[in-house]
């Protein structure tokens, strides 16, 4: 009745990692052509840094963590 039960259970972590990697590749796969050219890479990195800074400063101001 329980033959191969633990072997079957041990496959779930590998399945989970495969699903997460597949979602990641499909979500961010469209960025690959942009990363091949240096000028778009610099622009993309600049945009990401600016967006992260904006969100950080906005949350700090909203939560009252600093006097912005």
Image (cartoon, helix red, strand yellow):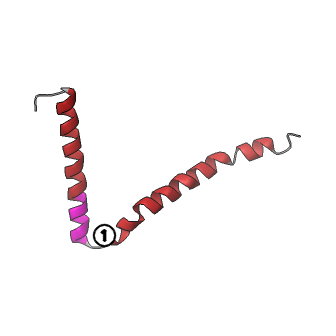
Residue at position x 40%, y 61% from top?
28
Left or right side of 31 for 52: left
Disc 1 target residue? 34
**Bounds of the magenta segment:** 38-45
Q: How many marks?
A: 1
Q: In which quadrant will I find the N terminus?
A: top right
Q: Position of residue 62 (x, y in %)?
A: 20, 31
Q: Secondary structure at mark 1?
A: helix
Q: Is residue 14 above or below residue 62?
A: below
Residue at position x 85%, y 40% from top?
2
Residue at position x 31%, y 68% from top?
35
Q: In which quadrant will I find the C terminus?
A: top left
Q: Position of residue 8 (x, y in %)?
A: 75, 46
Which residue is situated farthest in the top direction here? 64
Q: Is residue 42 magenta?
A: yes
Q: Position of residue 13 (x, y in %)?
A: 62, 46
């Amino acid at each position: 009745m329980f033959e191969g039960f633990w072997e079957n259970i041990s496959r779930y972590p590998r399945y989970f990692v495969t699903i997460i990697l597949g979602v990641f590749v499909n979500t961010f796969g469209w960025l690959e052509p942009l990363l091949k050219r240096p000028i778009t890479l610099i622009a993309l990195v600049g945009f990401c840094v600016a967006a992260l800074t904006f969100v950080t400063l906005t949350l700090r101001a909203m939560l009252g963590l600093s006097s912005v």
